[in-house]
Image: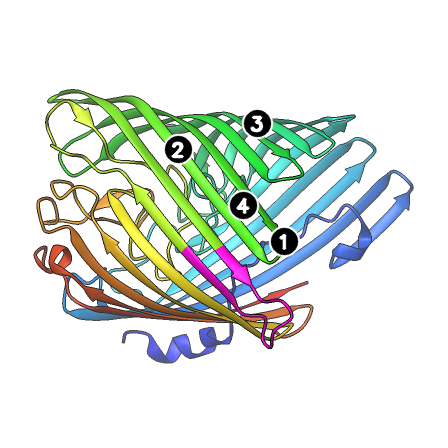
Amino acid sequence: MRGRARLLPLLLASCALPAVARAADCDAAGWCQRSDADTTLALDASLRLRSLYTDPSPFAVGDRADGYGLLRALASADLHRGAWQAYAQLGAHGEDGRRGGPGGTDQGALDLQQAFVAWQGGHLHLQLGRQEAAYGSSRLLSVRDGPNIRLAFDGARLSWRSNGARADLLALRPVDNRPGAFDDRADHSQFVVGAYATLKTAATDVDAYLLGYGRDGARYAGVRGDEQRRSLGTRLFGSARGWDWNTELVVQRGDLRADAGAQRIHAWTIATDTGYQWRDARWSPRLGVKTNLASGDRAPGDGRLQTFNALYPRASYFSEASFLAPANLMDLQPTLTLQPHPRWSTTLGVQWAWKHRSADAIYVSPMPLTPLAGSPGTARRIGRQLKWETRWIASAHWQWQLHLAHFVAGPGLRQAGGRDTSFASFLGAWTW
């Protein structure tokens, strides 16, 4: 493995932590100073190191292993004065040893990860500038913490909050990560606009949203073109008496303008995560079941595109290995989570995965959609994934995680030239 010796120090850490605590009070900050009752300045920093190994790479197509290390360093300053807030976060990201060089979210010199101003007045909150944006279960909008560079947007959000209810209006463009210093820019080939609302009730909590999305040069199994789609969705979630539930339904409509002619978009998904936890039992076991059904294209080239697009989802949609993207997919994933200690939890799971439509491709990372070459028209059964994920909160400043996964290729993947794939990730993070 190239760079093996240099990767040994990287085995010390990395973890899916929020990058930096935005401290309105001094208790949550690494360093904080109050000059008066209305003015607070908080400073924070974090360091994440991650070592990854995949065999073979990429995603079971090929015959060579790949192992590499990632470094993420973030530092922020958060100034509150009265109703106003100014927030700035610098980030530096490094990669070592990846076969073929760093990916698009692996490496970048010193740059602004976030930089915004915000105003809070009564029930209203306005935020302008570069900012991270995560909503709901992060199925469509997330900070994408798994990759080395977290996802940020340039734009504006206006929020209204009152008595457990919240409604957001947003207009954002994702940041285009570039390798130089202070050279990141908004990606003008993409945008997301819309509204997202949350209502808390006595029985269950409800999200409802309408998001408009555009992307130039979108690529699917049978067509490439400029995409515009609207996502209308709702989510029911909550917990009671040991049970927890999270069910989300999304319907998408729109157009894909391709050289071969316009394609009408008719796509959808339904995803559920339901579990029961025996809180009073030893190790507080939780038994859960996840199911996902994301539509695929029935007949490429017929003027209708039915492949679901998850927009900006978290990369670890099904596991930290990020083998599959949530498009043209049906899956079933039972999991068992144990907590031997308040600071230590471990999860075992298995995932069975199939194509929704045989004619469409198997979609893989990087997100949101990358059709696997040779996979359109293969068998529907993709394969089975086994995973083990464990987390240890060593102290107030340190976390450690270990992720192991093995994907057993099914006929659909093997017919595309794929094979069984193993994945390992050791990570840790320090925060101040």
**Disc 4 vs disc 2: which is toward the camera?**
2
The span from disc 1 to disc 2 (Cα, nearest Å) is 31 Å
In the rendering, at what x and y percent does residue 418 appear?
14, 61
**Compared to 349, does 133 lie above or below?**
above
| Residue labelled with disc 3 | 156
Q: Earlier in the sequence, mark 3 or mark 4?
A: 4
Label 4 residue SS: strand
Q: Earlier in the sequence, mark 4 or mark 2?
A: 4
Judged left or right of residue 365, residue 76 is right
For disc 4, the neighbor class at 10 Å (few under 14, some 14 to 19, many from 20) is: many
Q: Residue at x 24, y 31 (%)?
A: 217
| Residue labelled with disc 2 | 250
| Residue labelled with disc 1 | 20
The amino acid beneath tag 4 is Gln
- Do we see residue 316 in this rendering? no
Judge by depth and name the residue closer to the eye, 24 or 243.
Answer: 243
Magenta residues, start to end: 275-289
The span from disc 4 to disc 2 (Cα, nearest Å) is 30 Å
**Disc 3 vs disc 4: which is toward the camera?**
3
Judge by depth and name the residue closer to the eye, 411 or 69.
Answer: 411
Label 3 residue SS: strand
In the rendering, at what x and y percent does residue 177 appear?
41, 44
Q: Does the magenta segment cover residue 288?
A: yes
